Amino acid sequence: MQWYVIIISVATTGAFGWFALELVGRPIRNFFDLRRSVRSQMLFLANVAAPQPRETCVTSEQIRQYDTDLKNAREAQRILRDLASQMLAFAESERAACIAIRPFGFDPSSAGSGLIGLSNTLDRHGTDRASFRKKVERALRFSE
């Protein structure tokens, strides 16, 4: 084989490798960074209490506690909605990376919708909160 054919094939292989890493590798790394952020925020926000109903607050201490709990719940909702929007944007814009990670059990679209649902139920008591948390954990493989 001629020396210039070897040089051209090495350069072509290098270009295709670089293209594949940029197209799939970097978005997958970004997904795992986003997954780590979701996990840390879910652990941090696990103890955010839903405020008791406002109608049941009769003392000034209960009203202050309600205000504090409501403020904490609203901040937690804001954080979860931000993470959900990032996850849904990833699912919509990085199709090749989503196809590459789906065989490993990761589902960014389901995780984003679960985060939205979790943020919507964070300020209420009920069982929906646990089901949305499980949906996110399944979609991002936090628990088996």
Image (spheres, helix red, strand yellow):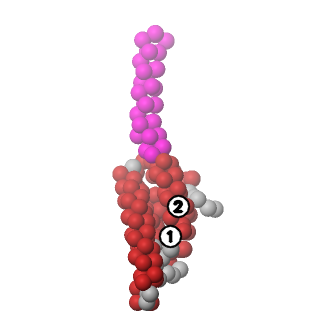
Identity of the residue drawn at 49% across and 81% down: 125
Q: CA distance from mark 1 to mark 2?
A: 8 Å
Q: Position of residue 106 (x, y in %)?
A: 52, 56
The residue type indicated by label 2 comes to Phe
Task: Report if residue 134 lies within the magenta region.
Answer: no
Identity of the residue drawn at 58% across and 59% down: 142
Quarter that holds the C terminus: bottom right
* Relative vertical location of residue 141 with respect to residue 134 in this rendering, above or below: above
Q: Which residue of the protein is positioned furthest toward the front in this rendering?
A: 60
Identity of the residue drawn at 55% across and 61% down: 43
Count of marks, rendered view: 2
Label 1, secondary structure: give it: loop
In this picture, which residue range is highlighted in magenta? Answer: 1-30
Number of the label disc, if any, that sits on residue 44: 2
Q: Is residue 92 visible?
A: no
Label 2, secondary structure: give it: helix
Q: Is residue 10 visible?
A: yes
* Relative vertical location of residue 86 with respect to residue 122 in this rendering, above or below: above
* Relative vertical location of residue 71 with respect to residue 22 in this rendering, above or below: below
Q: Position of residue 99 (x, y in %)?
A: 47, 51
Main secondary structure found in the magenta portion: helix
The residue type indicated by label 1 comes to Val
Task: Report if residue 19 lies within the magenta region.
Answer: yes
Question: Could you say which is closer to the camera, residue 118 or residue 48?
Answer: 48
| Badge 2 density bin: few <14, some 14–19, many ≥20, Cα 10 Å | few
Residue beneath label 1, please? 48
Q: Quadrant of residue 115?
A: bottom left
Identity of the residue drawn at 48% across and 43% down: 29
Question: Could you say which is closer to the camera, residue 127 or residue 47?
Answer: 47
